[in-house]
Image: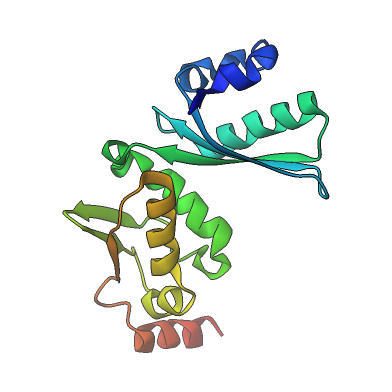
Amino acid sequence: MRGFYELFGAYRDRLTRYDKASKDAKIIKVVLIKDTGKLTLDVSFSLLMSEETIDAIGKILASELQIDGVKINPVFSPELLSNKYDAELIKLIKTNIVVANGFADNCRFIYENDRLTMILAGGGKEILMNAGCDKFIQNTLRESFGVSLSVEIQQNAESTADSLIAKQKEID
């Protein structure tokens, strides 16, 4: 593995605001797809970083390299996985599982041993399960943190399918 700035040191002045995370980052894998002009990087970070920050770094690199895009796949230490990552995980769920948008609002995560429990503030468990939300969370955490967790989705006891249908009828 090479240090991030070993490979991209020439652009350090444009990346200065991201130095806290980038200075210790390690490049794990580089893939350039010549046909599309896109670069994919697997990068190990010593700190948690938001998808927005990672995307911003990718845009700066794409601009400096004069290519169509740079996709950075972050890799974090398993020890960094905690409730500090919850807001980012919710954003990723909402972005990638479109039907999760409202259901994921105000949810909580409980990390216990080899299990993650997502507790919904309201209903929507079946909808999220059918959309593959549990599998998405498993894959995201495996790819980003190298952990294999079983994922369980729970909902508020009174938010059953019948109560959701009743609520919808009230609205209609």
Report the residue at 57% width, 32% height from top.
Answer: 53
Horizontally, is 18 left or right of 133 in the view?
Answer: right
Horizontally, is 29 left or right of 36 in the view?
Answer: left
Number of labelled discs?
0
Horizontal and vertical percent for residue 142? 38, 53
Report the residue at 31% width, 36% height from top.
Answer: 80
Horizontal and vertical percent for residue 65? 78, 27
Report the residue at 32% width, 77% height from top.
Answer: 159
Report the residue at 24% width, 76% height from top.
Answer: 157
Q: Judge by depth and name the residue closer to the eye, 72 or 49.
A: 72
Q: Judge by depth and name the residue closer to the eye, 6 or 154.
A: 6
Q: Judge by depth and name the residue closer to the eye, 124 or 78.
A: 78
Residue 150 occupies quadrant = bottom left
Q: Judge by depth and name the residue closer to the eye, 87 or 156.
A: 87
Horizontal and vertical percent for residue 112? 17, 54
Question: Which part of the image, by quadrant, shows the C terminus?
Answer: bottom right
**In the picture shown, does residue 9 fall above or below 117?**
above
Q: Residue furthest front?
A: 1
Horizontal and vertical percent for residue 58? 66, 33
Q: Residue furthest left?
A: 113
Horizontally, is 27 left or right of 58 in the view?
Answer: left
**In the picture shown, does residue 107 fall above or below 10?**
below
What kind of colouring is applied to the model shown? rainbow
Residue 107 occupies quadrant = bottom left
Q: Residue furthest top?
A: 13
**In the picture shown, does residue 77 fall above or below 159?**
above
